[in-house]
Image (tube, rainbow, N blue to C red):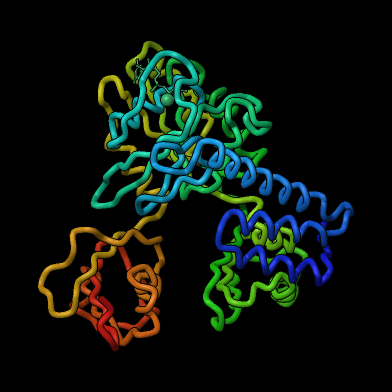
Amino acid sequence: MPTNLPPEAMDKWEEVEAAHTPKEKMDAMTEFLKYVPHHKGTMKLRGEMKRKISLIRDDLENKKRKGTGKGGGGPKLFIEKGASAQIALIGMTNVGKSALMSATTNSKVLVTPRPFSTHEPVPGIMNYLDVQFQIVEAPAVMEGAFEGKAGGQVTLGLARNADGVILMVDLGCDPVAQLELVLAELEKSRVLVYKPSGRVDIDRRHAGTALRVILVGRLLGCSMRDVEELLRQYKVHDAIVRISGEVSLDDVEDAVFESTIYKPAVIVANKLDLKGAQANLRQLKTFVNGKLPIVAMSCENKVGLQEVGKALFGSLGIIRIYTKEPGMRVHSDHPFALKKGATVNELAKNIHKELLSNFKFAMVWAKRLPSSPKKVGLNFVLDDGDIVEIHARVYLG
Ligand SMILES: Nc1nc2c(ncn2[C@@H]2O[C@H](COP(=O)(O)OP(=O)(O)OP(=O)(O)O)[C@@H](O)[C@H]2O)c(=O)[nH]1
Ligand SMILES: [Mg+2]
């Protein structure tokens, strides 16, 4: 059902979009809510906004209580990203999340048979093929997490903010029941791990870029004009909006409010060393039916550890782009990790915010090209392993 918001609400939404800090965002959302009328069509939106406001409020209060200095900390809802991609590691208690952190990352964690021993998010860096994943172990999920049990909102908030999730299960006991429980809590907080039939990606750009809607798929019960009009009403003026699959106007509105989101996921099935694990793994595979990758492993026996990074790399659709300074012979060892389909434009933006406006051309070395280097423009689509040298009008040190 459409929300039919009045223009005042749309104006207020613009302030939410422009907010820079969590506090500003919370205040702008509270202001926005005042202008959202009460009717059936706005129920979902009101609920979603209230949920977001309360999450930010809890987080700010926690920080205040525990202090934000280095020694303080406290449960952080938004762990600052310290790598190319942030992955939330979630699962029920004792499945071996800390054991995985300890075996594959640089973090210091407590591995213990005592349940619920990790009660604050713990980040750690995992290296895979020159790419760094920041894995964040989340407090264990239990039934009622969405309602706040065992710090559930922190865990679900982490999943929502991450670039992807690891769903970890214990092969020593019914993995299907564990997966179902975790998925149910995620679904209540509107985080989907199965690709929906349609998808709307709003890539907000700087002012002056204009609105471009790219449709690869089918609109249900609305036209392109309706979509553009709705986006303009919400002041989404400068963005590239990609619509794929089957999408309704409601789905577009959902995307503006980022209420239902899709996160790529990998299932990590641990404790393969235990008796009965193989039979449980077969059950899990039947249940998942190829819809998500499954990595079967054992932290105890150090089996399958490498496969975790490989599966994450694959499901996040990451490509590694190596950069080279003009005139230098070697490229850097630390690639930029971009999404499949990224162009030179995205790379330039990632390197330096001034680089786009000063961009002249780029030289690309790639195996798939008939001859390298090739001189290209901003729209050139990059691929894994490409080496790029960007030439700018002025030196940007
Ligand atoms: N047999 C076996 N035991 C494991 C394996 N991985 C972890 N464990 C054991 O499982 C228990 C729980 O491990 P943790 O890593 O602390 O589990 P967790 O998921 O972090 O649990 P909480 O943070 O407390 O919710 C510990 O006793 C581990 O030694 C494994 O591959 N095989
Ligand atoms: Mg733990």
The answer to which quarter of the image holds residue 111 is top left
Q: Tell me what residue is drawn at x 87 percent, y 58 percent.
A: 37
Which residue sits furthest top?
275
- Residue 266 quadrant: top left
Nearest the viewer among 30 and 146 is 30
Q: Is 4 above or below relative to 287?
A: below
Percent across and percent down for residue 374 are 23, 81
**Rendered-image quadrant of the C terminus:** bottom left
Ligand 1 falls in which quarter? top left
Question: Does residue 85 appear to the left or right of 226 in the view shown?
Answer: left
- Residue at 62% x, 47% y is 56
216 and 271: which is toward the camera: 271
Q: Is residue 358 left or right of residue 161?
A: left
Q: Position of residue 168 (x, y in %)?
A: 45, 30
- What percent of the width, then of the height, locates residue 71? 40, 37
- For the image, the number of numbered tags is 0
Q: Identify whether 161 is placed above or below 120.
A: below
Residue visible at 46% across and 50% down in the picture = 163
Residue sitting at 54 percent across and 67 percent down? 203
Viewed as shown, does residue 165 lie left or right of 362? right
Q: Nearer the viewer, residue 267 or 118?
A: 118
Residue 174 lies, with reference to residue 58, above or below; the image says above
